[in-house]
Image (cartoon, rainbow, N blue to C red):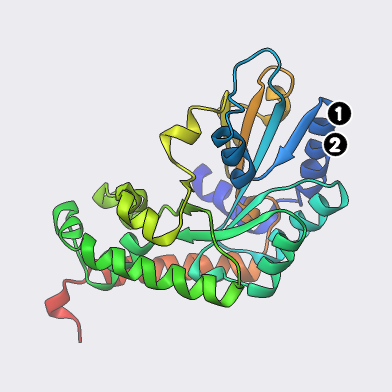
Amino acid sequence: MTIMFNRVYADYLMPSRLGEYESLLHAATAAGYTQLSVRDFFRRLRRGQQPGSPSAERLFVHRHDIDSDLRTAKKMFAIESRHGVRASYYFRLCTLDYGFMREIEAAGSEASYHYEEVADFAKRHHLRSAEAVRQHFPEIRELFVRNLGQIVDRLGFPIATVASHGDFVNRRLKVINHELLRDEALRRRCGIECESYDAELLRCFDVYISDRKYPVYYHPITPFDALGKHQHICLLTHPVQWETNWLENSRCNLRRLVEEMAWRVPAGRRA
């Protein structure tokens, strides 16, 4: 009963937390942090500005995964724009908004791809084991290349970093979308400099914080508690967890239910 109440509260009753987000940007600035995108942070690393030295800057990396709820994503971007904050926004195929993405790039932030070809392929073809999915990796890589190329063509600028999306199928089969990008030839072919879950990137953060649904909100600590204690901070956020959006949350919950029921049906029994 408690789990059900928490889910209903998070999806439909929770007051907006955008004031808290703006307060965080203020606090990070006041604490001396430069707030930047994943792309800019990674390029600093490549230029040899390594973390850990006494003279290293305080850096706060903002990563937004736009799983859903473009409305709240645009509100978060407006807050960041008012305060000169840069961030990375990763869009799924179902949340692509090319006008918004160009606006993000024009402001000096990063708009990129939140890819999920592994999960999509497994659901579409009713694959029920990790082995079956991995056997199709060559085909799935080509699907990724095609999707990314279409996005780049529509945007009119290259994409340097991407971020793997996590789906219920990935968790069930224990095959993450990120496995696809372990292929260095694929990265070179697509011009990808960094994947947001690369160990090379993650080890350069002193603390990596992800938002959570009510009642936890953050894991492993709050970003407010991290300020001043850690030099390089990454905060992963999902707009849907900062403001309720009844219509969007209902649509996503229904879509998840339909997808899971369809995936459970063996391919040979489909009508």
Q: Is residue 79 visible?
A: yes
The residue depicted at 65 percent of the width and 38 percent of the height is 61
Residue 97 position within the rendered picture, expressed as x and y whole percent measured from the top left: 63, 72
Rendering quarter of residue 133: bottom left
The residue depicted at 70 percent of the width and 61 percent of the height is 105
Circle 2: residue type: His
Rendering quarter of residue 265: bottom left
Circle 1: residue type: Ala
Q: Nearer the viewer, residue 258 or 106?
A: 106
Residue 40 position within the rendered picture, expressed as x and y whole percent measured from the top left: 64, 43
The image shows residue 71, relative to residue 61, as above or below, that is: below
Q: Residue furthest left?
A: 268
The residue depicted at 79 percent of the width and 50 percent of the height is 80
List the residue tagged with mark 2.
26
Numbered badge on residue 30 = 1
The image shows residue 82, relative to residue 128, as above or below, that is: above
The image shows residue 137, relative to residue 43, as above or below, that is: below
Tag 1 near tag 2, CB within 8 Å: yes
Q: Secondary structure at mark 2?
A: helix
